[in-house]
Image (cartoon, rainbow, N blue to C red):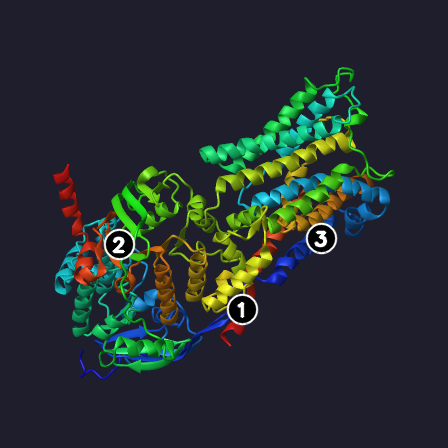
Amino acid sequence: MKKHNLISRLELTNITKQYPGCLANDNINLTLMPGEIHALLGENGAGKSTLVKTIYGVVAPDKGDIIWDGKEVNIKSPSIARDLGIGMVFQHFSLFETMTVCQNIELCLSKTQLSKIGDLAQRITELSEEYGLNVDPNRYVHSLSIGERQRVEIMRCLVQSVKLLILDEPTSVLTPQEVAGLFNVLRTLSKEGCSILFISHKLHEVTEICHKATILRGGKVVDTCVPNEETPATIAKMMVGDLAEQDAGYSKKEGSVEVFNASALSLPAKHPFGTTLKNINFDLKAGEILGIAGVAGNGQDELMAIISGEDDRNVKDGLSINGMSIGHLHAGERRKLGIANVPEERLGRGAVPDMSLTENTLLTHSDGFIKNGLVQWQSIKEYTTELISKYKVKCHGEFSEAKSLSGGNLQKFIMGREIGQAPKVLICAHPTWGVDVGAALAIHQALLELRDKGAAILLISEDIDELFLLADRMAAVCDGYLSPLVKTEETNIDQIGQWMAGTFINNANQTQEVSA
Amino acid sequence: MIRIQARTEPSTLMKVASPLLAIVLTLIFGSILFTAIGKDPYQALHVLLIAPLADSYNIGEMFVKMGPLLLCAVGLSLCYRANMWNIGAEGQLLAGALGGSAMALYFIDSESVFALPLTLIAGILSGMLWAALPTFLKLRYNSNLILTTIMFNYIALYLLIWAVHGPLRDPDGYGFPESAIFSDATLLPTIFESSRIHLGVLFAVLSGVVGWFILSKTHLGFQIRVFGADEPAARYAGFSGKKLSWFVMLFAGALAGLAGVSETTGPIGQLVPNVSPGYGYSAIIVAYLGRLHPIGAILAAVFMAVLYMGGDLAQIEMGIPVAVVSMFQGVLLFFLLACDFFINNRLISTNQATN
């Protein structure tokens, strides 16, 4: 970080943006110096996305000024932002899978930029070496891992000689090793004077790499701090406002009898960019949480769908509950046998957006609420009201439409609904993804309580900290393979990280060859 | 400047106001149209909309037309709620008319009390069969339901025309393409002495109530609503899409078949080539005008029946071509869909937004 340069790279004053029914940004001020890595923190809905979209020219602010290198600018569109030297890497990548890295990067450059660069492929190779990005310009995007794709996105900003790089939750899709690699790149960029605006939910990353942090709550700046003088816990407190209870370490349990079993589960991908499941074996015991780590898109969705029965292909004896094969049963029948599930996609799958919470309770919980084919609406209403108060779901009442709830509150509701059916097996995907700290804590405690009652829980998550916190045994998926299962106490982040990157796959194949 | 902005929540007011607004806009459009073809718009609208309700005979005739519209529309409402795009009510109605007539002709010399129920059942089953064929093709071979149901409408129509020219033609009918007049034992009784309102009209109103009951009170109806509102959620919950698809299609087929057989055993009394002036197609508009709600469909069917009656009267009294009715229906659906846009969107002035 160059401290001699006193002109700020970017200065925002009184940025205000009103959306219908919600003040997304309320007089936000923020200053970014050249070479500064600045964290933008806040719970979901705090206004982070709106603010960075304003800087990148996607959203026009209602009020406020943007000063860039000492001059007031009006960033009307992303192309103006790029011309100024602002680059942004979105959470969801915008790359064409069927094109090469070089072609993808070429697409977003203007003719003048291209002629200035000359040989684009060579430029990519040079930059790649300079920053240790390891991006081969001639590879096709579909053959790249998520981490590599992210580096292509960063490369896309670098070829345009970027002065400010905005990263929206860049680490949520990476293995721990890839995160370390990304941080090296960011540090190099920062040394060269490039400012970085870094949005993240993972506080220990923020304390590790960021020079300054701005904390948003309800569209307002509530605090700023120097992260390496704080701990993740103190920053979390600034984010949620009050002295929120923190997740402490939880005791690990050993499961008793086997309840659920998946054996030799192999299934071709249903669509071209899906993942083929390859010989997946695991068992799930009563009273334990089995955590499955993995970078998104390595077979988690496919595994979830085949277990729940939403993928209706018959896997015969590949799945069983209490020794009984369920591979041929459809999703509704599996539910009746006690398999509940909490999907990743809350609104639109876990809950019907336009229906009331009462109706959404009935969505999966019909047991005891149907008499002769008729719905007992009154008792469902009463039960839903109980759920709402038990899980502290913030809403107007049981009549509220699911879409009117915030992500965290809807997740608490869905979790409560599924747990309320006293499942034997609960499959739970990314339960706290994008959920604020308070709701995450409530969800964690609900899961542990269910485990202690003797349910078997399969927890699929990309958040490795969450897995270490909750899981009693762990495994990782990579490219449709499942790693060996290991007790959480007997492993560490390094090993799981390597498994997420697929180091176990060759070993697994070799053992198979030996045994064959 | 005015621009369109998405509403944060769908407007409840617009949900109710949209059909009414669409009707008003259609009337305005109609006035312009009548002026353009040299007719007095006030008189034309009066004949089209008020005259059908002016005396008890007209009201009776209006209800006779409402019956088949409503039966078809209730079935379609359930289909559309479940995202089954059944455009085949017309064919299912014709199949019901054909199957029912075949049974009625079997009882041509009978006075059995079972004659009428069996005739109605034959009509219902024929309608269900006609709905089952495209449903099977969709579920088994993933064919496009919209296309197959339209094609089956034509197959039913030409099958019916073949039947009245061939096997079902009245042998004593001087070669006219009509069946013999049915025996009294297979005719639907009328409800009132003075009018042609028959039992089928009562069935229709009853079907609206049954449709409402299924949708709002039963678990099956709930599953249909979830399936239509959010298919991934229905799959997640483990609802069987196949079962629901079969149910709504067979239900719609049964009601349309009943509509068909009620026409032939009710006001017509024999099988003729033009059993339906497009009731099955108009029912699509009725279903949407009634907000895919079976009770809403009752009101919408009354309105559409008035339009049908009015069209006949306008032709007789003012020489306005009957095609005007079809155009009115089309324009009405157009305005309805346009007005529905404002349930989820609104117009705002850009000046106001920046202040």
Disc marking residue A104: 2
Foreground mark, 3 or 1? 1
Q: Height in image: B249 above or below A132?
A: above
Q: Identify residue for label 3.
A: B27
Q: Amino acid at mark 1?
A: His
Dot 2: chain letter: A
Q: Height in image: B122 above or below A441?
A: above
Dot 3: chain letter: B
* Image point (29%, 71%), residue name: A248
Q: Identify residue for label 1.
A: A396
Secondary structure beneath dot 3 equals helix
Secondary structure beneath dot 1 equals loop
Dot 1: chain letter: A
Foreground mark, 1 or 2? 1
Q: Does the rendering let one see residue B220? A: yes
Instruction: Tell me residue A47's x, y (percent).
Output: 39, 72
Q: Amino acid at mark 2?
A: Asn
Instruction: Tell me residue B323's x, y (percent).
Output: 70, 39
